[in-house]
Amino acid sequence: MDKPNIAQKSPIIEKVKKGTYYWCACGQSKSQPYCDGSHKGSNFVPIEVIIPEEKNVAWCACKQSGNRPFCDGTHKSLQMKSLFINGLKVCDYGGSYPPLIFIHAFPLSSKMWKHQVDFFKSQYRVITYDVRGLGESKTEDNQYMMENFVDDFFSIIDNLNIEKSYVCGLSMGGYIILRAASKAPERFKGIILADTKAEKDDDEGLLNRSNSISQIKRNGVKEFTGVFLKKLVTEKNYGKPLIKEFLDKILIEQTPAGICGALIAIATRTDTSQVIKKLDLPTLIIVGEKDILIPLNFSVNLNNSIKESNLVIIPDSGHLTNIENPKLFNKVVSDFLELNK
């Protein structure tokens, strides 16, 4: 059974007796509100509902039913809310499910998470944002450090009144998470670190970033991103028009100043390889089998350092595992979240 379009759901009005019920937004609930948990063809989680006395209830598959099965029919929380917080473009897909925040890679934007937003927004309160200087988070002052990126993350969750959340970051997004989790682990329910590392840049890495900035200032963005894109995905996936065109559309939106600012910020990150040994958070580590930007050994280091971590290798993928193999990426993230509710 295909996953239903929950935006078109209508409440089911029914008189129910006192007892415990399991309401679910999976396809099994299209004609009746009870779910047996097998979820054939869907990825939903049943909600246990205790009805204290016989009454009429309106069951609905809309997001208003995240922590209660009763719906007023307005479906307000189905609307994605786009807002700016301290100059940062934030997309909040609403609902009362547990928050799940995605932080994007360099030199992309939150649009890179399209496959994950579509998959998870009916189960979690999905939030994405454009890191300062990239995407729609444009700024005139592009002189900032990694610590500013971390402060931006905390500013967003504070403004959205999020006490604890699951957070997933890829590459640069992982750098932000590692530093943020080291500073305030109590703000996290669990972390997903994709194609990232705890080590800071060595001298060669710093010189490469310096050369990239010089190249961008001299020749513009197009030449840099054209070469860099070939490093982000495998040669096979680079040859797939859907993947290349999807990434080209994101890259073309970036400005020289924004990319250079992000390069400087990444170069200023601290080494978290020692401090993460003290982390006591459920952690999923994901890496592409053929990632040439941050090879497998860095993910192995993370897995060996973080006590409650598991490592998953995504086959036939390079650096952008969430785009090159979104189906498997979503599954392993979903399984991790389910295990660590």
Image (cartoon, helix red, strand yellow):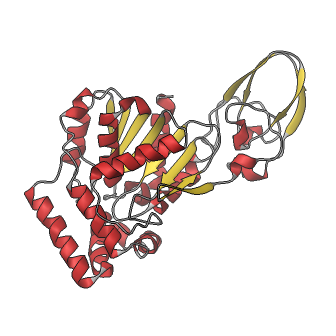
Residue pictured at 86% horizontal, 38% vertical: 12
Q: Does residue 251 sit above or below 35 in this rendering?
A: below
The answer to whether residue 4 is seen in the rendering is: no
Task: Please identify the quarter of the rendering in which residue 235 is found.
Answer: bottom left
Task: Please identify the quarter of the rendering in which residue 80 is found.
Answer: bottom right
Q: Position of residue 141 (x, y in %)?
A: 34, 66
Residue pictured at 11% horizontal, 54% vertical: 202
Residue 81 shown left or right of residue 279 in the figure = right
**Residue nearer the viewer, 138 or 107:** 138
Q: Position of residue 93 (x, y in %)?
A: 61, 50
Residue 135 shown left or right of residue 232 in the figure = right
Residue 32 shown left or right of residue 166 in the figure = right
The answer to whether residue 48 is seen in the rendering is: yes
Q: Residue furthest bottom?
A: 219
Q: Position of residue 256 (x, y in %)?
A: 32, 75
Residue 50 shown left or right of residue 122 in the figure = right
**Residue nearer the viewer, 142 or 318:** 142
Number of callouts: 0
Residue pictured at 89% horizontal, 35% vertical: 13
Q: Does residue 284 sit above or below 293 in this rendering?
A: above
Task: Please identify the quarter of the rendering in which residue 57 is found.
Answer: top right
Residue pictured at 52% horizontal, 59% vertical: 114
Q: Position of residue 201 (x, y in %)?
A: 16, 54
Q: Does residue 210 sit above or below 315 in this rendering?
A: below
**Residue nearer the viewer, 32 or 276:** 276
